[in-house]
Amino acid sequence: MNLTSLPQFTRNAKRFKEIVSILAKYGFANWIKESDPEFIKGLFSSSGEVKISELTVQARIRLALTELGTTTN
């Protein structure tokens, strides 16, 4: 492995964790729960501020995309 690629790998891993956490938060990561990968188990948590289950699918998509923000290369 090229050592210069480690910082990029770290950034990618952090972004992946962020994306999966946000998708799980808004109920869009059921496919991950079903496959139950060991390294993702700790990412699923719920927020006590908003009852996300009461929101429409459209509202959850909007909130998830807003929270994910922009992408960078």
Image (spheres, rainbow, N blue to C red):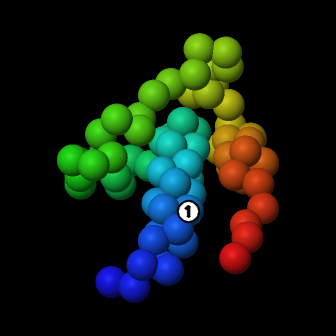
Query: What is the quadrant of the N terminus in the image?
Result: bottom left
Q: Amino acid at mark 1?
A: Arg
Residue 10: tell me if it is visible: yes
Q: Residue at x 34, y 35 (%)?
A: 42
Question: Counting other residues with Cα less than 10 Å from the Cα at mark 1, is it few (<14), some (14-19), or many (20 or more)?
Answer: few
Residue most extreme to the top: 48
Coordinates of residue 38 in the picture (x, y in percent)? 21, 47
Foreground: 40 or 7?
7
* Local SS, label 1: helix
Foreground: 73 or 2?
2
Residue most extreme to the bottom: 2
Foreground: 43 or 5?
5
Residue 58: tell me if it is visible: no
* Residue 2 image-quadrant placement: bottom left
Q: Please indicate whether residue 31 sits to the left or right of residue 13 in the image.
A: left
Coordinates of residue 44 in the picture (x, y in percent)? 41, 35
Q: Residue at x 42, y 78 (%)?
A: 3
The residue identified by callout 1 is 11
